[in-house]
Image (cartoon, helix red, strand yellow):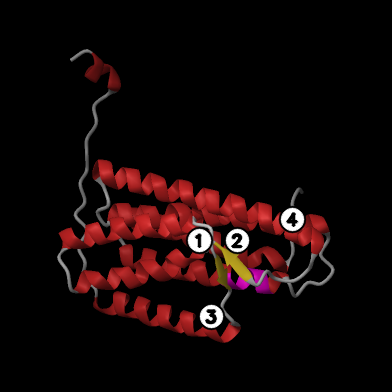
Amino acid sequence: MIGFYDYTVIMTYLSLLCSVFGITQAIDGRFRTAIVCLALSGLCDMLDGKIARTKKNRSSDQKLFGVQIDSLCDVICFGIFPVIICYILGVRGILGGIVIGYYSVCSVIRLGFFNVLETNRQMKEDGANKYYYGLPITSITIVLPIVFLLSFVISAYAFKWVLLMMLFVVATLFILKFRLKKPSTKQLAVIVIIVAIIVSVIMLYSDYRIKRKIVQEEALINELFE
């Protein structure tokens, strides 16, 4: 079989599986389950690099394979999955579609640029990079749950505009040129605890209602000749 199969890629695939399941839940209107899946996907992504680096005898092909599948999975987990949640929660219409498209393009640019930097870096040095260049795409797993807390205190209409602005700002930070120091292990632990508390509050207390609208389409041939 093609590819590499060892424990270093398990967390990357778990992150993808969490997001794929979360997408199905978002489509079915179970947004709270979807947000939990998004948070779990972010947690898996946070751990995959640390686990991969415990294997000291990885070949250059194994390292490059890890970089590629990590970014490919991230496109789905933190590029597509969040915009599906936001779409379900009301980011729609012409402006909503433009912002969703903008976020998606920026996330791909961010990940493509990461692949270039990381591939070049691994040719010269081992270990983890100490800095992010631009806002890491996984930050949406922190930002979106925090923003969702606003749904407790503002109207549904205002909340949709907040989601739209959040997507635009985060997407722009993906592609801005700045250097951000990576958090330490203790700081990551604090972030995980904070997100876990926020997700727990959402699960226990949110009664946000999603209005579902089913559009019945006619056959295209009928529409053309009406």
**Which numbered marker is on residue 13?**
2
Foreground mark, 4 or 3, reads: 4
In this view of the protein, which residue sits in the foreground, 83 or 162?
Answer: 162
Where in the figure is residue 139, as x and y percent of width and height? 47, 67
Q: Name the residue beneath numbered marker 1.
A: 137
Q: Residue 124 appears in which quarter of the rendering?
A: bottom right
The residue located at (36%, 57%) in the rendering is: 167
Q: Position of residue 44 (x, y in %)?
A: 56, 70
- Amino acid bearing label 2: Tyr
Q: Nearer the viewer, residue 212 or 173?
A: 173
- Our reading of the magenta stretch's main secondary structure is helix
CB under 8 Å between discs 3 and 2: no
**Disc 1: CA contacts within 10 A as few (<14), some (14-19) or many (>=20):** many
Q: Amino acid at mark 1?
A: Ile
Q: Which mark is residue 120?
A: 4
Name the secondary structure under disc 4: helix
Q: Amino acid at mark 3?
A: Leu
Q: Nearer the viewer, residue 161 or 19?
A: 161
Q: How would you rate the neighbour count of disc 4 (Cα within 10 Å): few for under 14, some for 14-19, many for 20 or more? A: few
**Upstream in sequence: badge 3 or badge 2:** 2
Q: Which residues are magenta?
A: 46-50
Residue at x 41%, y 60% (from the top left corner): 170
Looking at marks 2 and 1 on the same chain, the residue that comes earlier in the sequence is marked by 2
Q: Tell me which numbered mark, 4 or 3, is placed earlier along the sequence.
A: 4
Label annotation for residue 188: 3
Badge 3 or badge 1: first in the primary sequence? 1
Say which amino acid is labelled 4. Asn
Identify which residue is drawn at 24% across, 78% down: 205
> Left or right: 204 with respect to 183?
left
